[in-house]
Image (tube, rainbow, N blue to C red):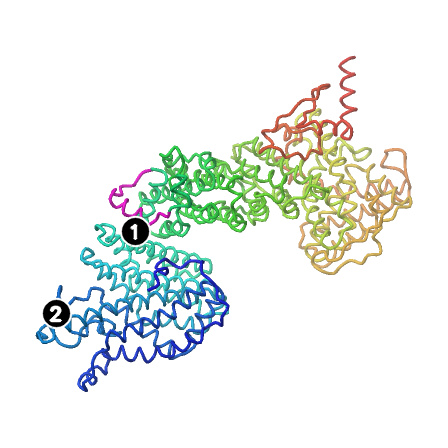
Amino acid sequence: MRRGRQDLPSDAGARADSAPLDRGIALALRRLPALADRLLPAEGPAASSSQSAGGHPPSAAVTKELQELLARVGDHLEQLGPSPEGAAAASAALEDGAARAAWLRVVAAVVRRPLTVPSSGSRSEGSGSAGVSSCSPGSGGSRSGSGNGGGNSGGNGDNERSELAREATALLVQEACATTSLLLHLLSRQPPPSAAAPEFVRKLLRMQTLQCLARRFAEAAVDTGSLTAQELELTVWYAKYLFSIVGALTTFSTESGPDQPPLVCLGRQLAEALLDSSVVEHGARLALVLQQRAPTCGVDSLQLMAKAMLYICRDISALHGALKEDGNEATCAVLRQVLSGRCARHVVLVHGVAALCWADGGPTYGLPDAVRQAALGSCMVPSAGQADGGRPVQLPTADMQAFHSVLYKDVPLTPVGTRVAVSVLLRFGRLVVASGDEGAAQQAGLRSVPGPAHAAGPGMVVPREDVHQCAAEILPKIVDLIRPLLAAGAPHWVAEAGADCWRLLVAVMSRPVLRVAITQNLEWLWAQMLLLWVPPLLPGEPLPSETPPVIAAMLAGGVLPCLERLLRRAGEEPLGPESAPVRAVLRCDKAWDLWSRLLAYGEPRQAAALVATVGKLLRRVGVTGMPFVDESALLALASSVLTRAMEMGIAPEVSRPRQLASLRMRAVCEWLPELSRVALSVASGGADELARVLQALTPLLAWLPPLLLRCGCGGGSGAMAGTATTAGADAVAGSSAMRDSTANDLRLLLLEEVRAVPLLGSGLRLARHVQGGAGRVIHAALAKGCCLAALTWPDEVRRAVCASSAGVGDGGSAVTASDGVAAVAPPQLSSSATRCSSAWPPELMHSLVLDLRKEGAEQIAGAGQVADGALALAELLEAWAAGGSSSGSDTGGSDPEARAWERFIAATAWLRKAVVLADGLMVTPAEARALLRTCSYRGCTRLAGDSEAEVRLQACGRCGAAWYCCRECQLSHWREGGHKEVCAGGAKAQCG
């Protein structure tokens, strides 16, 4: 007997360089049908004729020969181990149909053997064929041969032969279970499995193997105190055999593709067999009963029995999760019934609570000490060096996965049961975090569960390399249980437990724990938590007046500062451990759903710090020596947040509209200049760069109209002054001084930081390369922006046109527009166009007009009016170009220019009113920046520290009006940022 295979299958094992199946093993398998025929017919239909013809039941020698044959096959498979060679050898062992059928007959016989066969001298008088009858595939425990009164003649010899047969049969049962378990394990390691493999396991189910194993477990549980060591060992092999069947079928059904329907059906067939047989319930009951008796034959068998049942529940849970992702709800419901059995749940929870009590010394939830001590031995594996260094006991990851397999939201739980389940999962989560870093666990500071009683650290840990895998399985389960309960009026413990869930996630994202993480686990964990927790927000949907409980729990758990910390660390170290969760956050489809809640309900300074950090990251995009983990995803996030912010409604009763509006304006001030820089810097790139430009251009085109409208009263001249934005300005502020200040701030933002005029000129060149529905949207937005910019700053636009007409071409006239829906051909801008990208060629404006009047453009609201305004602007640009440069600022100019200007004013009157209607709660840039003081140098990219709110700033020693995070920023602002002139002027004024 190979004692090494008593342990559950592992990934360890030697590899062999031989052929898939050794010749000697192949010859041995050919003998299997004959040996099975010699052993089994004694109890089959031919038994009577065989006995009457003078035949004798098969001897112990025949049983032993069969056992040795299986042992030889098993040794060969074990030598190959869980390798490709081992998987190939396992498949080759089933290629011969006769051998495969004989193997199934032997397995069917051994699982039907009664566990407690009476012995000749101690329990009852039995026939000499007792050992053989126990191997009958169809007797189900019946006996044939003589009855109890067999006579005294040759009694001692019969008893001796009976004992030998019984011993040989027990060894055969063990070997058949062991070799078949190893065979199934290796078969599941071959992707895809051979054709014979699924047929083999399917027949195992059809011949009621699980039902027979359930009978053996029930038989053993009747009187565990009278079980012999051999019988107890047999129950362990039965349990391990069941574990192998469940594990193999789970692997076949979950790792098969959609083009393998027979393998997919195995999951459903396994679920039905598990439910019909109640084998998990019977096995769990036996494990519980065994732990309540005094072990007379060692504790190894008791531990292996319990561990096998735990792992079976784990695999069923894994199958449930995979089938749920595939939408197979009917099979999932069956599996939940299997896992919701009282004994199955109890055996898992008993071992889980026992492990927790050892780990943190916390509450036992009423678990008796004797049961807890008995269960503890089944889930403890000493870690390396424990005896010498006093290290904590190591809890295998598989045990951790098993412990929470029965805590599903779909499993019926009472309110008390739900609270206990959440408490258990939170304690497991704390144990997982402490396994990665004890300091992170202490920093988490869970409030809904008692703190650990061990001051020196946890008494049990999971392997550090599995910390994130365990966290990725535990935290979503807590969300499943807690989120439905988080509503207005929910008990206090629910809110605290929800916050604790996020505190654990924040602790998992600490750098010490991240260093031992697996990237895929991190990305999945972030995405899964966001998908499960953050409710979707429809476009234009108003935010509620009070912070929703689910969002309050998330914020109380520290998600806002955690997210900023991750972004800053990933910005400083693109290859650091924070890069994986940051990548997941940036790429998450629900990014807007998350960010809108963070900005609306987060602590104002923390939210402003997050906006400022993203602004610094955007400043690094495209800068040599400042790579980021995913620049495209960062641009997409900023673009999405700004664009959706224009659509976001706010309920009239919202208690903090000014905070939300201020943070939106803060994002506009921080992000729009960098998006404009990116758009202008890559405007002459390839097709991929064109897509990047459009990504940055979209939010700019969305925000330019309302911003231009606000600053019109401070920028235009001539006919423009006083007519462009009177209504909009009155909506912003009540005093003329405030309006002037706001207009000046916005003028500085748009003209100098966003560089709106060059940006729109670049957009005109790009517009012809975007056709179809997406192109029309871009064209309409671009036309609106150009019209309002010309209304607001006619002098700046005229200078750009005159510079172009003086000899600088647009550089892109030779490029033919693409016909696709999206941009497919990049514009080829010349160096002269790059030097004077402010130019607004009238012919490009005429192209916009043609696009806006094509078939299908009517789907865009106001497309006709926008086209009329663009046409009037094109004519105005032509008049300015024909008139040449002008030293004055009078927009009237010559008669053609004056008439063109008047037509333009008339054609765009509706546009000014339409933009005012969409511009309700914007605040001034000064108010937005007042939320959080940051470094005065606009080019600052320093990311030291965990939050922008914690940065220590020092005031300028000369004027005290500017503040800096470091000496480098102060010098740069003095030399390049214009502070030298401002500061000197302020000093002179003070001296005067």
Q: Give SS at disc 2.
A: loop
Q: Is 273 placed above or below 498 here?
A: below
Q: CA distance from mark 2 to mark 1?
A: 38 Å
Q: Is residue 367 rendered magenta in the image? A: yes
Image quadrant containing the C terminus: top right
- Where disc 1 sits, the SS reads helix
Query: Would residue 943 be found to the left or right of residue 235 on screen?
Result: right
Query: Quarter-wise, where is residue 247 in the image?
Result: bottom left
Query: Is residue 21 toward the left or the right of residue 865 in the image?
Result: left
Residue type, numbered disc 1: Val
Q: Which residues are magenta?
A: 362-381
Residue 23: x and y, percent?
44, 76
Q: Which mark is residue 507?
A: none
Name the residue at 68% across, 35% down: 941
Q: Which residue is mark 1?
A: 347
User: How many residues crowd around disc 2 within 10 Å: few (fewer than 14), some, or many (20 or more)?
Assistant: some
Q: Nearer the viewer, mark 2 or mark 1?
A: 2
Query: Which residue is at the front of the view, 544 or 835?
Result: 835
Does 376 lie within the magenta span? yes
User: What's the residue type where badge 2 is placed?
Assistant: Glu
Give the residue furthest to the top. 992
Q: Residue under circle 2?
A: 125
Q: Residues within 10 Å of mark 1 (few under 14, many from 20)?
A: many
Residue 365 location (% of width, % of height): 29, 41
Q: Position of residue 807 (x, y in %)?
A: 91, 46
Q: In front here: 240 or 912?
A: 240
Q: Quadrant of residue 560?
A: top right
From the viewer's perspective, is residue 604 above or below residue 339? Answer: above
Between residue 257 and residue 133, name the one nearer to us: 133
**Location of the N terminus (image quadrant):** bottom left
Left or right of 479 in this view: 832? right
